[in-house]
């Protein structure tokens, strides 16, 4: 049975609009399941779902004449004289597809639902063909609320974190620990034991490397980009030293930037820039790097508890808006600044001094809100827990 994702609540507002719905995200994050869920929700028989990783389905869209493509879709069951729905999975496999979709929208008012695993390609492909004809949504690994849903847990997180008692915290914390160690890829969450979860994580990475890097990336030095991924996994939460990485991998800086752009565009990593207000006191221009999923990070890099927790908080903050970090030349650092108005410090076991220090710096920066996110239970006031992020 397909499970509802939180992103569906955003998408369903646009189901009756004429524009195409495009869902992007990393491989195996649940894009196909999401649009199949939508497919099942649409009360119409005039719809078709095609997986474009299937070579046979690709051939349907390789005709030079778009009318011939329309005729093929009619044979497959679409009636273009009525409201019709076209679901296409993994559209990055066909570079001409955006113009085909535009033609079907403009001439036959077809409602299209599309998925693709590489924004690196989709943003370029759609930059002209579907201007004003699409809504773009990004799907990420499960957040903790979705994790609980997929686990079929009876736990309902309260709206107010202050109501969390220590016994309730301990109950939730056991599941949150599993979430930290194995992450939020749906298929991993649904596995029953540790061995199966680790095997799924390995399969996800293998699939990413083979289908994104080897097949779509078309890089001449695949071993270099593989080694770069492994190095980045070890550097989660750290500032990227481009000069050092370039030397370690024996590649030029422009090539390294190209690789990093590809890894970010295919959702494996995410870099965040420093928050900047005062030109003379901040470390600028040096980004930090995080992995798309803490389960992948833990499985391949064996990060320490604090770094793994920090990566998990980041992967859930990125859904909420712009994320930066802040650091002064003195070395004082704030882990995350969300949407330029909320400072977030991540701690395994926070102290009262941590709260005072964060409050002081955010006041100086003119930031409205300051939060410390704790992994452990705390009696301090104004503490947030990781499973609420």
Image: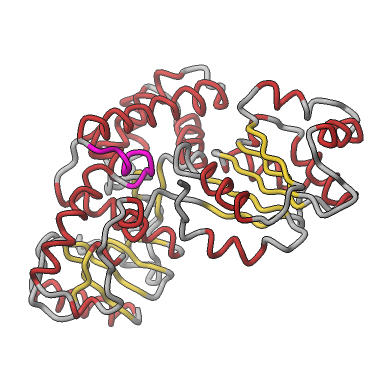
Residue 331 picture location, percent across and down: 20, 60
Q: Is residue 229 above or below residue 269?
A: above
Q: Is residue 116 above or below residue 256?
A: below
Residue nearest the observer in this picture, 114 or 270:
114
Picture quarter containing residue 148?
Answer: bottom left
Q: Is residue 2 above or below residue 54?
A: below
Residue 328 makes an appearance in the image: no
Instruction: Specify the quadrant of the image occupied by residue 95.
Output: top right
Residue 86, position as x, y percentages in the image = 73, 44
Residue sitting nearer the eye, 42 or 94: 42
Residue under the point 37% across and 59% down? 274
Vertical relation: 92 (above or below) 351:
above
Locate residue 212 relative to residue 233 in the image: left or right. right
Q: How is the image coloured?
A: secondary structure
Q: What residue sits 13% from the left and 71% below the top?
A: 354
Is residue 74 left or right of 1 when viewed as pictured?
Answer: right
Along the line of sight, the residue nearer the viewer: 73 or 379: 73
Image label count: 0
Quarter containing the C terminus: bottom left
The boundaries of the magenta stretch are: 184-192
Q: Position of residue 387 (x, y in %)?
A: 25, 62
Task: From the viewer's perspective, tell me whether residue 175 is left or right of residue 111.
Answer: left
Where residue 150 appears, as percent x and y from the top left, is 35, 51
Q: Is residue 329 visible?
A: yes
Residue in the foreground of this view, choosing between 319 and 323:
319
Q: Residue at x 17, y 75 (%)?
A: 164
Task: Classify residue 63 by image quadrant.
Answer: top right
Does the stretch in magenta take in 322?
no
């Amino acid at each position: 049975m397909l499970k509802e994702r939180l992103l569906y609540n955003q998408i369903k507002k646009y189901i009756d609009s004429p524009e195409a719905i495009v869902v992007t995200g990393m491989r195996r994050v649940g894009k196909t399941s999401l649009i199949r869920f939508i497919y099942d929700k649409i009360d119409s028989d005039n719809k078709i779902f095609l997986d474009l990783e299937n070579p046979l389905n690709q051939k349907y869209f390789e005709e030079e004449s778009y009318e011939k493509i329309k005729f093929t879709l009619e044979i497959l069951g679409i009636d273009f004289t009525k409201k019709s729905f076209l679901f296409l999975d993994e559209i990055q496999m066909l570079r001409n597809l955006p113009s085909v979709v535009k033609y079907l929208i403009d001439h036959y008012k077809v409602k299209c639902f599309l998925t693709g695993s590489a924004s690196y390609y989709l943003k370029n492909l759609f930059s002209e063909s579907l201007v004003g004809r699409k809504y773009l949504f990004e799907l990420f690994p499960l957040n903790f609320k979705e994790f609980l849903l997929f686990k079929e847990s009876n736990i309902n997180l309260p709206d107010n974190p202050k109501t969390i008692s220590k016994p309730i915290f301990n109950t939730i914390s056991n599941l949150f620990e599993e979430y930290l160690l194995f992450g939020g890829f749906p298929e991993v969450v649904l596995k029953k034991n540790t061995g199966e979860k680790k095997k799924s994580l390995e399969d996800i990475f293998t699939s990413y490397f083979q289908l994104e890097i080897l097949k779509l990336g078309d890089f001449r030095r695949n071993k270099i980009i593989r080694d770069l991924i492994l190095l980045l996994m070890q550097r989660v939460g750290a500032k990227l030293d481009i000069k050092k990485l370039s030397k370690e991998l024996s590649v030029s800086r422009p090539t390294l930037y190209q690789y990093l752009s590809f890894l970010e565009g295919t959702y494996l990593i995410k870099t965040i820039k420093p928050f900047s207000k005062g030109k003379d006191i901040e470390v600028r221009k040096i980004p930090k790097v995080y992995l798309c999923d803490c389960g992948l990070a833990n499985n391949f890099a064996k990060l320490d508890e604090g770094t793994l927790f920090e990566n998990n908080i980041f992967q859930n903050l990125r859904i909420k808006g712009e994320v930066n970090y802040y650091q002064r030349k003195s070395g004082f650092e704030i882990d995350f600044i969300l949407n330029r108005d909320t400072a977030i410090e991540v701690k395994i076991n926070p102290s009262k001094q941590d709260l005072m220090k964060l409050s002081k710096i955010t006041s100086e920066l003119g930031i409205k809100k300051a939060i410390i996110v704790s992994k452990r239970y705390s009696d301090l006031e104004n503490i947030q827990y990781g499973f609420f992020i």
